[in-house]
Amino acid sequence: MSTFAAVVLFVGVLVYAVLGGADFGAGFWDLTAGGAEAGRRPRHLVDESLAPVWEANHVWLIFVLVMLWTAFSPAFAAITTTLYVPLGLAALGIVMRGAGFAFRKVMVRTDQQRVTGAAFAASSVVTPFFLGTVAGGIASGRVPTAGHGDGVTSWVNPTSLLGGVLAVLACAFTAAVFLTAEARRRDEPGLETWFRRRALVAAVVTGVVALAGIAVLHADSPRLFDDLLGRGLPLVLLSALCGLASVVLLRRAAPRVLQGLAVTAVAAIIAGWGVAQYPFLLGTHLRITAAAAPTSTLWALTIVAVVALLLVVPSMGLLFVLAQRGRLESH
């Protein structure tokens, strides 16, 4: 039962990483789009693409926090009392991002739009970075079972910094592929080329950092390195193949094929981390079974989670379908 709860928890992590990652990555391209005139059209496409879904994706973050808090409360306490700095900064980034995105639409003066736009774009980069450092701290075993670990070295270390950088790059790559597909759907060849070039650059940079990361993990987290290149290797290879295929097919494939390949590339590497981490919740010192709540609590939580998913998944599916068909665009 505890393993099942852990799988449900990790599925929530995976879905948030993919859907939320695409949103954060759009903010990355907003930040790097250039001046007001040069970046006007890319920013408009980012606005139009994000507006219907940007807030909805955070439901998966809430789902993950509730599952972790209720089903694995010792791990939740250990993580929050050790990694409170990056978690706090990520939460601040989420708030600033939402405020910046919402207020940019209603501001009239150009200088006000620049300030709110900068808040949205900068926090879209900062937030995934700190969430990536949290993942690195957990995976490398720097969160003690009793909590209250080192507030600095738990996330300022080679594995965590690698996780932060890869999170930002993966978000940028996913968003660039999604926005290339969206520009093609809207029959805007200029924007399609603009985002396609950036998807290629993001893919190359992500690949280079990932290859360099092999040496980083080998030196800093040998257990994670062994498991990723052991039982996690098929998923790592699947991620690499899908990423490569999405780059090769950027010019020709249908938008949904491109989006599917980008999603699979990100989801597979996250799943590879989960497989490498099993059967531990924290490093190699806190097993899933040791951190799990009593069976009766897990059963009650499972029932609540199933009901929640039955309500959320169809609703979000309808939201994404309407967004993809252009039925939610502002006029």
Image (tube, rainbow, N blue to C red):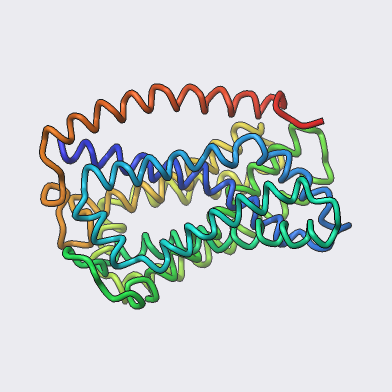
Q: How many labels, in total?
A: 0
Residue in the foreground of this view, choosing between 242 and 8: 8
Task: Tell me which residue sits at (25%, 51%) in the image.
Answer: 231
Image check: 67 left or right of 265? left
Find residue 139 and report its image quarter. Answer: bottom left
- Residue 117: image location, x then y, percent: 72, 57
- Residue 30: image location, x then y, percent: 71, 55
Task: Tell me which residue sits at (73%, 50%) in the image.
Answer: 195
- Residue 158: image location, x then y, percent: 39, 75
Q: Quick one: quadrant of the C terminus?
A: top right
Image check: 88 left or right of 243? left
- Residue 51: image location, x then y, percent: 67, 39
Look at the picture and state if 154 lies above or below 96. Answer: below
Q: Quick one: quadrant of the N terminus?
A: top left
Find residue 60 and report its image quarter. Answer: top left
Task: Tell me which residue sits at (77%, 32%) in the image.
Answer: 330
Look at the picture and state if 156 lies above or below 165. Answer: below
Q: Residue furthest right?
A: 37
Find residue 143 and report its image quarter. Answer: bottom left
Look at the picture and state if 251 lies above or below 73. Answer: above
Look at the picture and state if 302 lies above or below 116. Answer: above
Task: Tell me which residue sits at (47%, 48%) in the image.
Answer: 266
Image check: 251 left or right of 79? right
